[in-house]
Image: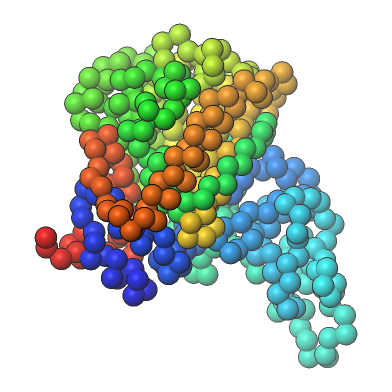
Amino acid sequence: MSDTLLSSAAGLRAGYSLPRQFYTSEAIFADDMREIITRKWILAGHVSQIPNAGDYVLFKVGQEQIILIRDTKNAVNAFFNVCRHRGSTLCSAEQGNARRLVCPYHAWTFGLDGALISARLMADDFDKADNGLFAAHVRVFHGLIFVNLSEDAPDDFDATFGEFDAILDYHGFADAKVAHIGRYPTAANWKLVVENFLECYHCQPAHPEFCSMHPAEALLAVGAGPSSGPNEAMESYGPVLAAWEEKAAAMGRPLGNVDDGPETSHLRLLMQRTMREGYISETADGLPASSLMGKRKDWDFGRMHLAFSPMSHIVADNDFAMLFRFTPRTAMTTDVDILWLVDGKAENYDVDKMIWGWDRTTLQDKTITEDNQTGILSHRYAPGRYSTQERGLETFQKWYLRHHGLTHQDAPAA
């Protein structure tokens, strides 16, 4: 734990946003990378991005670059983009195809499995077997590619995420394909990006398009997850949700909520709820942008929000789904990416119609989050008290602090 992190803990107050340094300090960002980001299973992409042997994409997190590449045995591998000779970057293009990975500096050549194939003029005692690429932990789950950068054994993937098997299978993610990728690089600390996504207190003033697609009572009660709104709002919306769940279950949709607490490893969530009356999908007119996705036989007027961690989310309608990646890069920059997926057999889908709502919403989020970061840089910033519609932020904050061995009790009494 850095001295900056320890000293900043003196300003912690339960029910309030974090002290300034948590959102600005390079030292605390390094702590975050070491203790949280590199130890979590992070959603990095979808297998449809690399369909053929030799296809690769780069996934960047912090100062690391990970090569996601499909080999000749159809396996997806993940390697650090670092040559084992003197550390040069192997792949500079964001995506491509390579029969072998050849370092442009001194031509060391690696196979798609990461093994060193060729290194010119090396001494007789040089062992190629000891100089393969460094691998990252990788797992493909229903077509979703996850990486874990830990040097130690990561959290057991199946034990952590196996509970999502039925719902991901029903939505057809394994056989889906990417229809569009939106990139929204955001000049803000990763925690500000996550906090913005985990509360809907800002939805009404900031997101007119988003609010137009959803029932106001649902946004108040569960707009950002099962415990994001006031208890009384959920009590009011509960009967509406229960009636929809009964109909959806009869149509074969797997149900169930996941609402992890701060003591858990990944802070997962799963929330399924209704669309606005008369709306089939999250589009401007409520009409579909693509054909039914996965195992559905008919439209059920619902949508799903699933989080594998605070950095990796899915929002899924009946006809398309979105993979949200909030990837920390520096203390005050975060890569925000959305991958729009459709059914693998879909042909006549309307990309503009599909991305309308969340593209505009995410551009708005980029602006308000960057403005939030700018305000926090002021010496007059002080942590503000959370509303009853920001309960998810309290959970996230406790989860975050626990990973650093901190609690609100580390602050001195007022």
The spot of residue 95 in percent (x, y) is 75, 50
Residue found farthest to the top? 278
- Could you tell me if residue 394 is visible in this image? yes
Q: Is residue 149 or residue 95 the one in the foreground?
A: 95
User: Is the residue 155 above or below the residue 369 in the image?
Assistant: below
Which residue is at 45% across, 8% downward? 278
**Quadrant location of residue 137?**
bottom right
Task: Report the side of 153 relative to 142 (left or right).
Answer: left
User: Is the residue 400 above or below the residue 314 in the image?
Assistant: below
Q: Is residue 103 or residue 243 the one in the foreground?
A: 103
The spot of residue 17 in percent (x, y) is 29, 50
- Could you tell me if residue 251 is visible in this image? no
Which residue is at 22% across, 19% downward? 236
Which residue is at 21% across, 23% downward? 235
Q: Is residue 383 or residue 315 the one in the foreground?
A: 383
The spot of residue 365 in percent (x, y) is 47, 37
Q: Is residue 404 or residue 209 the one in the foreground?
A: 209
Task: Report the side of 286 relative to 262 (left or right).
Answer: right
The spot of residue 334 in percent (x, y) is 52, 51
Q: Total number of numbered labels?
A: 0
Colour scheme used in the picture?
rainbow
Quadrant holding the N terminus? bottom left
Residue found farthest to the left? 414
Task: Report the side of 306 relative to 243 (left or right).
Answer: right
User: Is the residue 164 above or below the residue 214 in the image?
Assistant: below
Which residue is at 27% across, 20% downward? 237
Quadrant holding the C terminus? bottom left
**Quadrant location of residue 232?**
top left
